[in-house]
Image (spheres, rainbow, N blue to C red):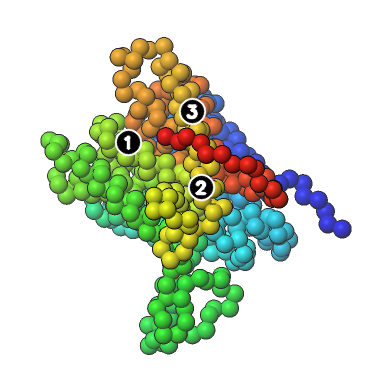
């Protein structure tokens, strides 16, 4: 007789994220964590939520307001949030009991890997190894490129913050001072991209690199698959070049197109035709950096509050889409955006299936994408409305021009766990900060909980309702 589950598996990440936030708030509120006057409970909770949800919105300057202990607490919260408290919990459960229930296994798989049939222990171990290796190499590279600015702890802090897509910086101007530094920009961009494409894609890339390495060492002869390796969906047969799976290709191609289109859009909107005191090389690099970072990373090399309205609108769209499923990034995810784009194209062409590349996305996934975007849009609109009421509801429109865009930008940044801001975060009222706290928490965990709840509510119907045409448009 099996013992009944104490709580639904999808409730575990909510509880552990909440526990981490509460613990972090208490530590950040202590006198050991701050310099000067103490931090209010609201500001401590806001900072802990922003770090755990790898958002990056700040109400006080991280580098000057927090002590080394406080910065270490923020770093630990970022790392925990980036990997996912659920990952740590599942790993601890696995190591203790050496097995995990099918329900928990599938729940973890839906969050971290598009295919839930995988070996949990090996996969979680690979997550930790990938994360530690990438962050260590990133920190070392930053230190070698700029040893004066990126000292030991400073380099580690920014490398972890970049890979986890958190956007926390120990510099008051984020990374504006490095706007023209090609090396630092490229390292941070690479860390952000690797942290935002998802662990399953990273695993496939690692497998392909290992295959190529073995082929080079054996002069083109491919040995047998490594025992215990994760199931691979890319080509590994002898004589064939290794090829990414359809899912990994979908993530990489969609991410690449979003980065490219965002890069060109920001460059045209903010620099072409404008007399800005920025060299052309810096303008090109800064536009690329902002296109990458607003996909939920939160760093900036341009003053966001001084960018054009067109650039802010482009960034809002990119922040809302976010990164890949099972990654450190937030948003509704690139696969959702690609599914919706494919759905629209299929409808315009009169095609019944949503075809992406050589595969059609199943109808259930398309339906989930539609519902997810609708709910996400509703949440963002509701939060923006609340912020508009609390931050300027009694101000006549002629005196509040531009405020709505700032608040919408802030709301999307919080929901997408991005961390970019036009500069109004610290000046928000206590109610406005609490709205963002809830928004960051929902944005980080909402899609996972929502998708699990929708699957739990599915009920097969053995009848059809009568249909009537409705006037649309």
Observer-nearest of 246 and 48: 246
Percent position (x, y) of residue 15? 65, 41
Tell me, yes or no, if residue 172 can be seen here: yes
| 10 Å crowding of disc 3: few (<14), some (14-19), many (20+) | many
Residue at 55% in and 47% down: 368
User: Which mark identifies residue 369?
Assistant: 2
- At 61% across and 65% down in the image, what residue appears? 118
Q: Mark 1 and 2 residues: CB-CB less than 8 Å, in contact?
A: no
Marks 1 and 3, the one that precedes in the sequence: 1
Residue at image location 39% in from the left, 59% down from the top: 252
Nearer-N-terminus badge (2/3): 2
Mark 2: few, some, or many residues within 10 Å (few <14, many ≥20)?
many
Locate residue 60, reporting x and y percent. Answer: 42, 30
- Residue tagged by mark 3? 383
Q: How far apart are marks 1 and 2 (CA)?
A: 22 Å
Tell which of 445 and 145 is nearer to you. Answer: 445
Quadrant where the N terminus lies? bottom right
Q: What residue sits right under mark 1 in the picture?
A: 313
Nearer the observer: mark 2 or 3; the answer is 2
- Gap between marks 2 and 3, in whole Å? 21 Å
């Amino acid at each position: 007789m099996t013992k009944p589950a104490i709580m639904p598996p999808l409730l575990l990440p909510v509880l552990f994220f909440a526990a981490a936030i509460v613990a972090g708030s208490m530590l950040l509120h202590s006198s050991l964590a701050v310099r000067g006057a103490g931090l209010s409970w609201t500001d401590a909770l806001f900072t802990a939520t922003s770090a755990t949800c790898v958002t990056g919105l700040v109400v006080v300057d991280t580098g000057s307001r927090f002590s080394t202990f406080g910065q270490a607490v923020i770093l630990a919260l970022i790392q925990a949030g980036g990997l996912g408290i659920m990952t740590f919990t599942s790993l601890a459960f696995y190591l203790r009991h050496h097995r995990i229930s099918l329900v928990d296994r599938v729940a973890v798989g839906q969050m971290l890997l598009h295919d839930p049939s995988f070996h949990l222990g090996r996969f979680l171990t690979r997550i930790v190894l990938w994360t530690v290796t990438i962050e260590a190499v990133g920190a070392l590279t930053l230190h070698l490129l700029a040893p004066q600015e990126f000292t030991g702890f400073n380099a580690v802090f920014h490398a972890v913050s970049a890979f986890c897509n958190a956007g926390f910086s120990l510099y008051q101007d984020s990374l504006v001072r490095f706007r023209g530094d090609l090396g630092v920009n490229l390292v941070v961009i690479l860390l952000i991209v690797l942290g935002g494409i998802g662990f399953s894609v990273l695993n496939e890339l690692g497998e392909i690199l290992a295959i190529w390495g073995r082929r080079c060492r054996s002069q083109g002869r491919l040995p047998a698959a490594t025992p215990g390796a994760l199931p691979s969906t890319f080509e590994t047969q002898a004589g064939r070049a290794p090829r990414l799976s359809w899912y990994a290709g979908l993530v990489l191609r969609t991410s690449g197109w979003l980065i490219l289109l965002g890069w060109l859009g920001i460059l045209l909107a903010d620099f072409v035709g404008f007399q800005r005191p920025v060299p052309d090389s810096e303008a090109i690099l800064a536009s690329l950096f902002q296109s990458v970072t607003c996909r939920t990373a939160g760093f900036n090399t341009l003053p966001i509050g001084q960018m054009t309205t067109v650039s802010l609108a482009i960034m809002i769209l990119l922040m809302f889409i976010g990164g890949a499923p099972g990654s450190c990034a937030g948003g509704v995810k690139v696969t959702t955006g690609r599914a919706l784009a494919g759905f629209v194209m299929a409808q315009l062409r009169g095609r019944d299936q949503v075809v992406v590349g050589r595969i059609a996305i199943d109808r259930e996934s398309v339906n989930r994408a539609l519902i997810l975007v609708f709910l996400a849009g509703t949440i963002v609109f509701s939060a923006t409305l609340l912020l508009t009421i609390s931050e300027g509801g009694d101000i006549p429109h002629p005196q509040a021009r531009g405020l709505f865009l700032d608040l919408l930008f802030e709301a999307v940044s919080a929901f997408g766990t991005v961390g970019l801001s036009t500069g109004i975060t610290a000046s928000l009222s206590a109610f406005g900060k609490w709205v963002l706290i809830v928004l960051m928490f929902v944005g980080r965990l909402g899609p996972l909980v929502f998708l699990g709840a929708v699957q739990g509510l599915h009920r097969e119907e053995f009848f059809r309702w009568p249909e009537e045409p409705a006037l649309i448009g």
